[in-house]
């Protein structure tokens, strides 16, 4: 069995580089430890107790730390401002701010907080302690059901990123971490690109990534579609999960490149016929005929198991039949009456809602979403959304305090799909965010004006432009 390439130091690279607007105040708080030998127990910003050094690179060190108030373990990346400015990486870091703030998803490593002094930037990230998928696969190939679950979670996160104009470009086993519950967490967006950086034709020109996972068109240096290149990388990952070795592998790198160009790989005998056909569609050397993310999610092999939906929503039928499996139905029953509170908005989230700091223009077209503040109970808001969906014969998909409404009419851009998310602003106020996720903008605007807005207006506490004012009233 050909071995998977050796893993590299993950943590120094997996944490994105970000900066904060509140970096001008100098505090008496100690700077980051100046060497790996610094004693454990140093207190950072009166909030975090620093632990052991997890890793370090040219511009940063990563420490395990504990939130003094909550006891939560986190990973803190300490970046040297002077070094990044001299190396010309300031612009790169600013770009990554947009990406890290935008890609909040259950299967992506979360940015928790950003702090700074005159000389250092501190990025507090979710600490993922379960290791990476490389380590797991190095002990032996995975069972088909386990591999499928990880692949479903990977595709869910990649679909989420692509929907926001973010393309990872370095998807590989070493960048897929596992949390305490065994769920996948995509990390290291250091090579990612956003749609606004691309030319009008959406073509990437930069050669980057890990050779064994790169799509053949990337090697040509003639430009490539980053979304299609990500799909290829996902296919390589799926193959390794199921086979235990790389589909294109050779000690001679040039021979490996030739195999990738020609698409020379063979599925082992334990691959099911369905999986073999899917692998052929993903690892198609022609990007124009390669299967897309949306097509993968509709594939029969992919849809097997309990996690059929890309955003992990509980599927409830409203107006037309649901495709939820028996496993999904059991999952819904267990959740009834025990839904958690809506996600609270911290200061970083509130700043991102402000028009002055809104970064969403980098990822979404304008005019395709709205927000309002409501004092209505969350359950009442969700019930009203279900009523609207029932009248319009839309399907409702729910998870916690997120609701997705999906129309039944298929168009060139798919059915009209609207996502509504509810966030806790204060104990008595919530922010309701409505976004178009699929379909034509004209159809979305008509549905909002005739169906959605008239029904939700009675629940509005503040509207669009007033949201920012309302947020200013939130106690610190």
Image: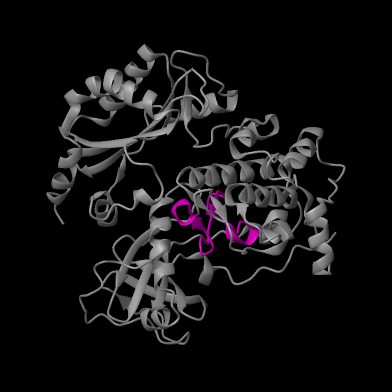
Residue at 18% x, 30% y is 460
Whole-percent x, y for residue 336 in the image: 41, 27
Left or right: residue 250 versus residue 442 is right
| Residue 324 in sight | yes
434 part of magenta stretch: no
Closest to the observer, 37 or 215:
215
| Residue 215 in sight | no
Residue at 27% x, 31% y is 378
Quarter of the picture containing the C terminus is: bottom left
Residue at 44% x, 25% y is 416
186 part of magenta stretch: yes
Whole-percent x, y for residue 205 in the image: 59, 60
Left or right: residue 219 versus residue 76 is right
Q: Which residues are magenta?
A: 169-198
Q: Is residue 306 above or below residue 122?
A: above
Quarter of the picture containing the N terminus is: bottom right
Whole-percent x, y for residue 262 in the image: 82, 52
Residue at 75% x, 62% y is 4
Whole-percent x, y for residue 53 in the image: 48, 77
Left or right: residue 316 versus residue 302 is left
* Count of marks placed on residues: 0
The colour scheme applied to this rendered structure is one colour
Closest to the observer, 175 or 83:
83
């Amino acid at each position: 069995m050909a071995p998977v390439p050796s893993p590299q130091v993950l943590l120094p690279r997996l944490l994105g580089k970000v900066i904060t607007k509140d970096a001008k105040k100098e505090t008496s708080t100690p700077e980051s430890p100046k060497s790996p030998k610094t004693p454990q127990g140093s207190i950072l910003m009166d909030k975090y107790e620093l632990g052991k050094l997890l890793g370090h690179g040219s511009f940063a060190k990563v420490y395990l730390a504990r939130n003094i108030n909550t006891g939560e373990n986190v990973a803190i990346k300490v970046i040297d401002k002077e070094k990044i400015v001299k190396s010309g990486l300031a612009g790169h870091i600013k770009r990554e701010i947009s990406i890290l703030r935008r890609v909040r998803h259950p299967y992506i490593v979360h940015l928790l907080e950003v702090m700074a002094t005159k000389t250092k930037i501190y990025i507090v990230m979710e600490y993922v302690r379960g290791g990476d998928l490389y380590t797991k696969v190095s002990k032996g190939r995975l069972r088909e059901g386990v591999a499928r679950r990880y692949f479903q979670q990977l595709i869910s996160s990649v679909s989420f990123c692509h929907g926001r104009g973010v393309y990872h470009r370095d998807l590989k086993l070493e960048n897929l971490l596992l949390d305490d519950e065994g769920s996948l967490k995509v990390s290291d967006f250091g090579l990612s690109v956003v749609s606004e950086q691309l030319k009008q034709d959406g073509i990437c020109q930069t050669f980057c990534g890990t050779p064994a996972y790169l799509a053949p068109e990337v090697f040509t240096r003639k430009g490539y579609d980053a979304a299609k290149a990500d799909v290829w990388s996902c296919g390589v990952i799926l193959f390794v999960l199921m086979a235990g070795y790389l589909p294109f592998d050779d000690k001679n790198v040039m021979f490996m490149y030739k195999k990738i160009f020609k698409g020379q790989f063979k599925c082992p005998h334990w691959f099911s016929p369905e999986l073999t056909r899917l692998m052929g569609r993903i690892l198609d050397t022609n990007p124009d005929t390669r299967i897309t993310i949306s097509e993968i999610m509709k594939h029969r092999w992919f849809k097997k198991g309990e996690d059929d939906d890309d955003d992990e929503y509980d599927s409830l039928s409203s107006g037309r039949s649901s495709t939820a499996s028996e496993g999904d139905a059991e999952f819904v029953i267990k959740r009834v009456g025990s839904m958690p509170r809506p996600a609270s908005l911290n200061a970083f989230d509130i700043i991102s809602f402000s028009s002055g700091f809104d970064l969403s223009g980098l990822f979404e077209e304008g005019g395709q979403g709205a927000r309002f503040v409501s004092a209505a109970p969350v359950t009442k808001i969700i019930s009203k959304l279900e009523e609207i969906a029932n009248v319009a014969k839309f399907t409702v998909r729910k998870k916690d305090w997120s609701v997705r409404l999906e129309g039944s009419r298929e168009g060139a851009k798919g059915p009209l799909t609207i996502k509504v998310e509810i966030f806790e602003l204060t104990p008595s106020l919530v922010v309701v965010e409505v976004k178009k996720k699929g379909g034509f903008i004209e159809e979305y605007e008509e549905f909002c004006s005739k169906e959605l807005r008239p029904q939700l207006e009675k629940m509005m506490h503040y509207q669009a432009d007033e949201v920012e004012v309302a947020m200013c009233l939130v106690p610190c």
